């Protein structure tokens, strides 16, 4: 397809117009922050943590200094999220999308370079010279609309990049709780192993003395063997969770020796109560905001397609010909494509279909967001109630039973194997509480993600 062009009537006019084109094209410039201020501000608001794009060695040194300071002590959930936001290389790669989108925006505000054609031919002894200077006229006409479209896309990319930062933060927070729970699981699995080992040793001794049947001895030995397998599985789960957290935080070398707390954070005294959570999510979720911008941009693009579908080729240029022995030729050259076979209907139909596709995807995102909020809040409340039930009922009851059995053992009312069996059950109930507490913190993270990366204040959703 040939460029759409504009011309002037004299070399002086052409020069003036070319200069104006250069000045107009130079108006589109890059911003100082490259769009990163939006990412920084929204991420800070939603997570309470900072982000930093690494472009230079000084940036890398600054990030490493911050990470080293955080790694000097056992990490809490906020520290792990902060390290991931600074050091996750996949997230750093996503930040580059801002530069790509801004470059497209700046390019849309700059006109295409003018063209110059020089032709020299000979006819016998005569020489024919043709000079043509062309400038893209349609790009000048459509530049404001194209720049507006790219501006919307730039804003959309800012939201999508920020949403990716929030996703990394949420994944890191989930994995952090999984890693601590797995670490606690190893400790309690070892306790079960010690109890099982004691029972197996005692059973073996009593069996040798003829005071214990082969069946009862085999049962204790089998339990001990299963306890050893349980320790191995717990260690594997702990290593896998820790390595996943290491990857999310982008750590390597000596930094992988970071410390984690020995236990999960305590359950909050009260759960979060939400009213009109769906409305809150629709207003705050960045994927919905990005979808709205995409749909608006496609609508504008559809308007551009309808406007230019009949002007497929329009070449208008200044012509200056010289021929030996003949007067100079000056004039204009105009070429236009005749819409005989292609009237642009296919392009318009395609644009309309793409637009409706975007509309329906946005509607799907909104429907899914509402469902995710309902589902995540139900999961949040269920896990809170379950963890609270373990903390306030099951674990205390198991401890009371253990204390009573210890008194009976001291009074020689029960044997050592009944005492060991009770100890195993008490450890199992504590393990159940650890799992319930881990599920609660993960459910809270899922709820935060479903609401747009930030939990509302106590009354922030009232009356919406």
Image: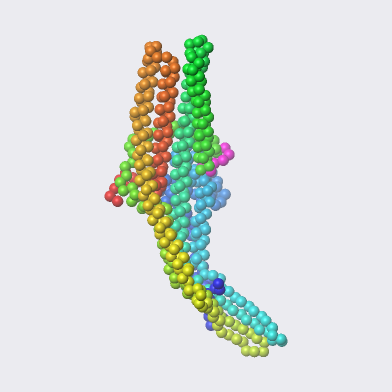
User: In the displayed image of the protein, which residue is found farthest to the right?
Assistant: 125
Q: In this view, does 199 lie above or below 263?
A: above
Give the residue drawn at x 54%, y 75%: 135
Report if residue 140 is visible in the image.
Answer: no
User: In the displayed image of the protein, which residue is found farthest to the bottom?
Assistant: 326
Residue 76 percent coordinates (x, y)? 45, 37
Give the residue drawn at x 40%, y 53%: 365
User: In the displayed image of the protein, which residue is found farthest to the top?
Assistant: 209
Q: In this view, does 139 lie above or below 78?
A: below
Residue 350 percent coordinates (x, y)? 46, 65
Compare residues 268 and 340 and report the one nearer the observer.
340
In which quadrant is the N terminus drawn?
bottom right
Report the magenta residues as a range. Answer: 249-254
Residue 173 percent coordinates (x, y)? 45, 41
Give the residue drawn at x 32%, y 44%: 274
For residue 414, what is the image quadrant?
A: top left
For residue 116, what is the image quadrant?
A: bottom right
Q: In this view, does 11 lie to the left or right of 301?
A: right
Q: Is residue 133 left or right of residue 399?
A: right
Is 307 one of the magenta-colored residues? no
Q: Is residue 225 above or below residue 150?
A: above
Report if residue 327 is visible in the image.
Answer: yes
Residue 223 percent coordinates (x, y)? 49, 23
């Amino acid at each position: 397809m040939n460029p759409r062009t504009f011309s002037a009537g004299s070399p002086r006019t052409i020069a003036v117009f070319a200069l104006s084109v250069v000045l107009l094209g130079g108006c589109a410039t890059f911003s100082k922050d490259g769009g990163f201020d939006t990412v920084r501000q929204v991420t800070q608001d939603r997570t309470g943590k900072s982000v930093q794009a690494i472009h230079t060695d000084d940036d890398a040194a600054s990030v490493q200094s911050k990470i080293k300071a955080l790694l000097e002590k056992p990490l809490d959930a906020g520290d792990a999220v902060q390290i991931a936001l600074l050091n996750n290389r996949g997230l750093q790669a996503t930040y580059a999308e801002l530069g790509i989108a801004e470059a497209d925006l700046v390019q849309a505000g700059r006109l295409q370079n003018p063209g110059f054609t020089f032709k020299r031919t000979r006819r016998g002894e005569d020489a024919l010279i043709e000079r043509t200077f062309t400038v893209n006229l349609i790009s000048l006409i459509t530049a404001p609309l194209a720049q507006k479209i790219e501006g919307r896309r730039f804003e959309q990319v800012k939201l999508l990049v920020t949403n990716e930062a929030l996703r990394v933060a949420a994944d890191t927070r989930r994995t952090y709780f999984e890693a601590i729970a797995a670490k606690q699981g190893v400790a309690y699995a070892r306790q079960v192993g010690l109890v099982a080992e004691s029972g197996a040793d005692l059973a073996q001794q009593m069996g040798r003395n003829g005071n214990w049947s082969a069946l009862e001895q085999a049962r204790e030995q089998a339990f001990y063997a299963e306890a050893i397998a349980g320790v191995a599985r717990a260690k594997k789960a702990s290593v896998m969770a820790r390595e996943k957290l290491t990857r999310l935080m982008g750590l390597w070398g000596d930094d992988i020796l970071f410390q984690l707390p020995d236990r999960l954070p305590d359950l909050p005294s009260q759960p979060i109560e939400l009213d009109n959570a769906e409305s809150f999510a629709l207003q705050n979720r960045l994927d919905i905001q990005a979808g709205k911008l995409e749909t608006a941009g496609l609508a504008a693009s559809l308007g551009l397609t309808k406007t230019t579908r009949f002007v497929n080729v329009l070449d208008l240029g200044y012509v200056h010909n010289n021929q030996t022995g003949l007067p100079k030729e000056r004039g204009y050259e105009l070429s236009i494509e005749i819409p005989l076979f292609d009237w642009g209907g296919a392009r318009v139909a395609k644009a309309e279909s793409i637009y409706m596709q975007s509309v329906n995807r946005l509607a799907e995102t909104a429907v899914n967001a509402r469902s995710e909020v309902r589902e995540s809040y139900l999961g949040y409340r269920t896990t809170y109630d379950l963890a609270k039930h373990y903390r306030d009922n099951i674990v205390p009851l198991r401890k009371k039973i253990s204390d009573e059995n210890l008194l009976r053992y001291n009074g020689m009312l029960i044997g050592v194997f009944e005492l060991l069996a009770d100890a195993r059950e008490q450890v199992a109930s504590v393990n159940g509480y650890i799992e319930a507490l881990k599920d609660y913190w993960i459910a809270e993270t899922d709820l935060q993600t479903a609401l747009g990366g930030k939990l509302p204040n106590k009354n922030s959703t009232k009356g919406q």
